[in-house]
Amino acid sequence: MLLMFVLLALLVIPMAIGDAFVYHIFITICMFAGLATAWNIVGGYAGQLSLGHAVFYGIGAYVGMLLVSAGITPWIGMFAGAGIAALVAVAISYPCFRLHGPFFALASIAFLEVFRVLALHFGDITGGATGMMVPLETGWQWMIFRDRLPSLVIAFGLMLTTLAVAWGLRRHRFGFYLVATRERESAARSAGIGTVRMRLLAVAVSAALTAMIGTFHAMYLTFIEPSSVFSLTFSIQIAMFALIGGIGTIFGPLVGTILLVPLTELARGWLGAEALGLHGFVYGTVLVLAVLFMPDGIMSALGKLVRKRATAPGASEGAPRTAESVERPAIGGAVLKAENLDKHFGGLHVTNNVSFTLREGEVLGVIGPNGAGKTTVFNMLSGFLKPDSGRVLLRDADGEFRSPTSPGDFARLQLGRTFQIVQPFAAMTVEENIMVGAFHRHPRVADARRAAREMAERMGLSRHLDDEARGLPVGALKRLEIARVMAMEPRVLLLDEAMAGINRADLRQAIELIREIRDTGVSIIAIEHVMQAIMSLSDRVIVINSGEVIAEGEPDAVVRDEAVIEAYLGKESVDAEAA
């Protein structure tokens, strides 16, 4: 209701006042709100800090202007510019997505400068430093009007379109995947998400929307030149509105724009030439205050306040739900085979000829001293590392053994894994975390949400459904990660130290939970240092030391093996005990 009131005010207030300058302020608000929302799809949802986003704005502006000069309406030029911008975005982003952190931001700035120089160089087409002026033909066909109201209507419509796209994406499976990719790329890949493809789709949509607004703004200004449309300052402005309002939220960019644009535009209008550069001071001041007091933005702070007030006091966390007694199925044939896995990191031979078989419905424990190569084996078993030699074979639903090569391939063959260091999607709620896994089997949001709630109840996480994962204690985080993986409905589950660092009560719950999972027929490989757990859960145990399998068999026999004792305690201890 409040949102509807705010949006309606963007139309009603300038119409009620009727002043041309007020119209200009509200047109600017709508235009920047649309640009910041489009940027937020890449910078907020996908987590790619683009500081050269004005590239796509400039493409839209120039394509629209060139087509108008050729007698073609900007309504067509708007979509032509959007298509070209989307193609350019994919072409320049694909290599850049290999860069992370500040390097991607720097690359986006570099491309912005390249396009500015190209626009200056091809002056015969773009007008060069002199710029281009649109033929002054008025009317809806040309998006040029004597009054400001039609321009406000168009800007408002473009802003609504961008908000609708952002809202639809965030509530679609695609939006969940984008945020998961931003939060934990490795965990997202293990859930079968094609992270690069998701980001490319996001940047294409964002670029297309940005270019459409660029076409309109060129018609509104009636003049463009390279330094203004391919401007780093302009790009930073767009990002700053989203940052202050709340990146990753749907309406944060709108809030940030409504807060900042009137301040700067009114200051310019009242102070005239004396206000040159004042907008930078205003942006900087508000940004500093936001970082100090609301580091996640205005909308995130408001959302946390609402959730805090809505939390019912006195609720208990609850333990994982105890399933009805189910007779454990008999251990079947092989479901996974590791054959002669070798892996080198430079001159270090991390794994050497590691081979073993996992059978259907079996729990296979993997133990060994720290640095023995256990997690490296897990990474090869799930596609995160490619073995230098050897292969991993996984049985599909038809009974055929296949050799997958990527985490997505392993996920499609129903293998799920947890990580040694818990990797939740920190800014997503518990429910959304589990939904990311559930999407693997339930593409519709409603079905994935239902499956996630059922899994949360099973894991004792129902109380935390609306809590952000970053606030959970360690035990709950461990259960959350298992819940996300189990929501994928795997046939093979890899547990990498799932019981490390938890208290005794959580340990007992974890052991019972893994037994329950085992009794449903899921095959489990567990790396674990908690010997109580590995001894009570495992049907077989393999011991890895210095990258080699040194023992394999039933738990009681393996722990009495002299080679195993030596690996853990050292040869001197074994000799002393023998003496």
Image (spheres, rainbow, N blue to C red):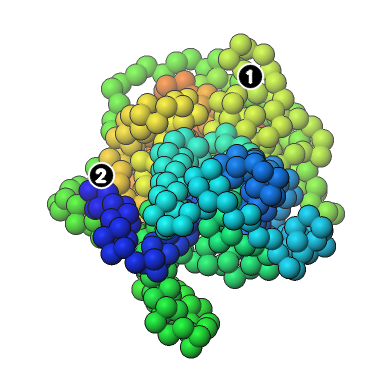
Instruction: Depth check: give the residue in front, 132 or 37.
Output: 132
Residue 55, horizontal then vertical, whole percent: 66, 57
Q: Residues within 10 Å of mark 1 (few under 14, many from 20)?
A: some
- Label 1 sits on residue: 395
The kind of residue on which mark 2 rests is: Arg
- Label 2 sits on residue: 463
Which label number is shown at residue 286? none
Residue drawn at x 82%, y 35% is 389
Tag 1's secondary structure?
strand
Does residue 228 appear in the picture of this structure?
A: yes
Q: CA distance from mark 1 to mark 2?
A: 37 Å
* Marks 1 and 2, the one that precedes in the sequence: 1
Q: Residues within 10 Å of mark 2 (few under 14, many from 20)?
A: some
Residue 190, horizontal then vertical, whole percent: 57, 38
Instruction: Depth check: give the residue in front, 274 or 39.
Output: 274
Q: Taking 91 as reference, is 244 left or right?
A: left
Instruction: Depth check: give the residue in front, 232 or 304.
Output: 232
